[in-house]
Image (cartoon, rainbow, N blue to C red):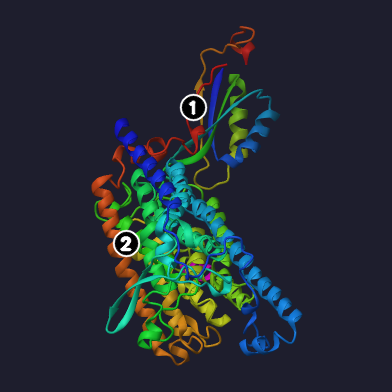
């Protein structure tokens, strides 16, 4: 089992959600987050004075998937979330030790 | 701290009781003095149709024809009463519009400030309505208008007839009125009451201007005292000099300077007074923490709700029709059409010019400056709106929009005074431009007999340089008077109650510390019992 954490542009959420649904990802958690990468925020102007917004709003998707699905998931996110411009985000793939479904107590792959 | 606050509340209660007692035991009137008309049945009559229009009856017509046609004389009396009624309704409705500008100020100022201080900024804008009004009722109205009666267009107010004067250079200088305290006794008169409402809402516009420049760091207790003082003393004195028959109004009849200082609806009386006060207050308070870096460069502190601020500016622009067109105090003076149109034209010029200025110099149109520009145009046209042509109205507004931008940056970058909403530039600087522009552009089509000087009002470019001189004197007087009284009032408040909030409170937000109710409590996570 693997955990996918993908940070994407907020307006790409719908496309990514649909793309993952099509290949059998059954659930995901979405967080509204703020952060910066190499882009280092962006500057805005208010009444003639420039100021830098360091942390830019992003959406973080978290999904637990079977290991064999990971290449497809990564591929789908790459296609759906890419604009080609700076600030498209990142995908993290993590090992997942255990999953438990709270209602039934199922564990491991059964619980995904 | 708590005991201290309780003591404070006690003083406020005592003051309120004192006001009530004093209001009911005022001295009675002399036997031969003019009588007030509390019911309104005796106000407005045949005398009010004399010279009402080009073909109206003259004084002589009425004297010679009344006996021959008694019914016509009675009908004429009703016509006169109706004329005064139209004027009164117009004055009151326009006053109601101006009152609604308080909502516009509240939204504009709160929108341009930060979320953590939104409740406090709103609270100041809300309470200044009540505080200013109480001060104005207490003595402000008497000081301003106590010697200005009778109010011709409202058909009454003859009891407001006593001005305190001093004699200089052989001429009388009116300083303040002395009738109408507590709006009681002789002031219990329909015309005096209607005039009170209209003048009160104008004063409250001045009162609420400094709450913008001083926002996000002003203690509420010292603000409370300021609120009463501005309505009771600070505003009424200068207003008396210009509108209450005081010495600036008499510069024409006494010293042959045009028609004296002419300010149709209050570029100087209302806006410049507010703007200079706003400057003195903001200067004494110092900038918000973090506004300027150590090297003096200003940092942007974006307002938290620009849409709210923009709606606020629209409400102000709407109320401004009451402000300017209402200042005829007469719905039968058809110049109101010119006044209203000039008002809207100048606002368009201001919004257009400030938008273009920001776009050209800073790369993008800035809606916050555009909104300020619209108000700048309105402030500037407030004095000359009744005296200028349409193209000049557009020009005055356009220049106001540019002055606004230049002034905002001058105040912030050169003077290092922190004005979160641009109040100093909108009201102070453009208020001055407004009265001066009247002295330049008044076209001589209106204002016959203004301030007791025969002939119409003409500016420098239309042949009367002395009018411009009178405008300059009025402007300088405003700056000097308001700066001095503003300094004294704010300094005394600073020494006694403290003007500035605790730095820790400022960082955490005034909503948490200065007022009881936080504007946006849902920002905090909180569990409720089930």
Residues in magenta, as a range: B351-357
Tell me the quadrant of the picture where the C terminus of chain B can be found. Answer: top right
Residue at image x 53%, y 12%? A98
User: Can I make out residue B339 in this image?
Assistant: yes
Q: Could you say where residue B287 lies in the image, as x and y percent from the top left?
A: 31, 52
B113 or B147: nearer the viewer: B147
B24 or B522: nearer the viewer: B24
Q: Please give the residue where the numbered disc 2 appears in the rendered image.
A: B413
**Do callouts 2 and 1 point to residues on the same chain?**
yes
Where residue B248 sits, quadrant-wise, is bottom left
Where residue B15 sits, quadrant-wise, is top left
Q: Is mark 1 on a helix, strand or loop?
A: loop
Q: Could you say where residue B87 lies in the image, as x and y percent from the top left?
A: 62, 70
Q: Main secondary structure of the magenta part?
A: helix
Mark 1 neighbour density, 10 Å: few (under 14) some (14–19) many (20 or more) = few
Q: What element carries label 2?
A: helix
| Image position of B274 with respect to B150: above or below | above
| Image position of B124 with respect to B150: above or below | above
Q: Please give the residue where the numbered disc 1 appears in the rendered image.
A: B525
Q: Could you say where residue B371 lies in the image, as x and y percent from the top left?
A: 51, 61
Q: Which of marks 2 and 1 is nearer the N terminus?
A: 2
Q: Could you say where residue B30 lies in the image, as x and y percent from the top left?
A: 44, 66
| Image position of B29 with respect to B444: above or below | above
Chain of the residue under the numbered disc 2 shown in the image: B
Chain of the residue under the numbered disc 1 shown in the image: B
Mark 2 neighbour density, 10 Å: few (under 14) some (14–19) many (20 or more) = some
Left or right, residue B199 beside residue A112: left
């Amino acid at each position: 089992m693997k955990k996918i954490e993908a940070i994407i542009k907020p307006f790409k959420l719908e496309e990514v959600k649909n793309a993952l649904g099509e290949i059998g990802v059954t659930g995901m958690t979405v967080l509204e987050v703020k952060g910066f990468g190499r882009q280092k925020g962006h500057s805005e102007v208010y009444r003639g004075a420039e100021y830098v917004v360091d942390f830019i709003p992003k959406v973080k998707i978290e999904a637990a998937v079977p290991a064999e699905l990971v290449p497809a998931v990564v591929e789908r996110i790459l296609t759906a979330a890419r604009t080609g411009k700076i600030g498209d985000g990142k995908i993290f793939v993590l090992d997942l030790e255990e999953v438990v479904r709270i209602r039934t107590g199922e564990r491991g792959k059964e619980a995904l | 701290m708590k005991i201290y606050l309780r003591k404070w509340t006690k003083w406020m209660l005592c003051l309120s009781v004192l006001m009530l007692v004093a209001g009911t035991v005022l001295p009675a009137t002399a036997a031969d003095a003019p009588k007030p008309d509390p019911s309104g049945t005796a106000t407005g009559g045949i005398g009010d149709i004399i010279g009402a229009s080009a073909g109206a009856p003259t004084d002589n017509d009425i004297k010679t024809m009344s006996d021959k046609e008694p019914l016509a004389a009675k009908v004429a009396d009703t016509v006169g009463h109706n004329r005064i009624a139209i004027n009164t309704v117009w004055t009151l409705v326009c006053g109601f519009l101006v009152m609604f500008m308080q909502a516009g100020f509240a939204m504009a100022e709160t929108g341009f400030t930060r979320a953590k201080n939104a409740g406090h900024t709103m609270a100041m804008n809300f309470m200044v309505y009540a505080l200013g009004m109480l001060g104005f009722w207490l003595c402000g109205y008497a000081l301003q208008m106590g010697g200005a009666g009778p109010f011709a267009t409202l058909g009454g107010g003859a009891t407001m007839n006593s001005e305190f004067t001093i004699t200089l250079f052989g001429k009388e200088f009116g300083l303040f009125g002395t009738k109408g305290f507590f709006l009681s006794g002789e002031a219990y008169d329909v015309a005096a009451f209607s005039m009170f409402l209209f003048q009160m809402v104008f004063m409250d516009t001045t009162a609420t201007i400094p709450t913008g420049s001083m926002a996000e760091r002003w203690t509420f207790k010292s603000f409370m005292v300021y609120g009463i003082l501005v309505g009771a003393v600070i505003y009424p004195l200068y207003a008396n000099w210009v509108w209450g028959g005081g010495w600036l109004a008499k510069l024409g009849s006494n010293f042959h300077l045009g028609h004296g200082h002419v300010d149709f609806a209050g570029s100087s009386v209302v806006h410049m007074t507010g703007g200079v006060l706003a400057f003195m207050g903001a200067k004494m308070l110092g900038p918000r923490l973090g506004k300027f870096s150590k090297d003096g460069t200003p940092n942007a502190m974006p307002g938290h709700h620009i849409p709210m601020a923009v709606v606020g500016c629209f409400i102000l622009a709407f109320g401004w029709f009451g402000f300017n067109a209402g200042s005829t105090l007469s719905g039968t003076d058809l110049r109101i059409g010119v006044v209203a149109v000039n008002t809207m034209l100048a606002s368009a010029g201001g919004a257009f010019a400030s938008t273009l200025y920001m776009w050209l110099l800073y790369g993008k149109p800035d809606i916050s400056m555009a909104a300020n520009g619209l108000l700048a145009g309105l402030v500037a046209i407030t004095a000359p709106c009744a005296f200028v042509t349409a193209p000049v109205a557009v020009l005055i507004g356009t220049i106001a929009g540019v002055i606004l931008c230049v002034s905002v940056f001058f105040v912030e970058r050169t003077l290092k005074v922190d004005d979160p909403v641009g109040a100093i530039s909108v009201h102070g600087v453009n208020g001055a431009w407004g009265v001066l522009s009247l002295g330049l552009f008044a076209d001589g089509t209106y204002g016959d007999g203004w301030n007791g000087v025969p002939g119409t009002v003409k500016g420098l470019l239309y042949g009367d340089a002395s009018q411009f001189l009178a405008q300059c004197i009025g402007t300088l007087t405003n700056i000097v008077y308001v700066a001095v009284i503003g300094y004294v009032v704010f300094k005394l408040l600073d020494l006694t109650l403290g003007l500035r909030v605790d730095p820790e409170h400022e960082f955490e937000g005034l909503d948490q510390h200065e007022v009881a109710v936080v504007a946006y409590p849902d920002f905090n996570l909180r569990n409720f019992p089930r």
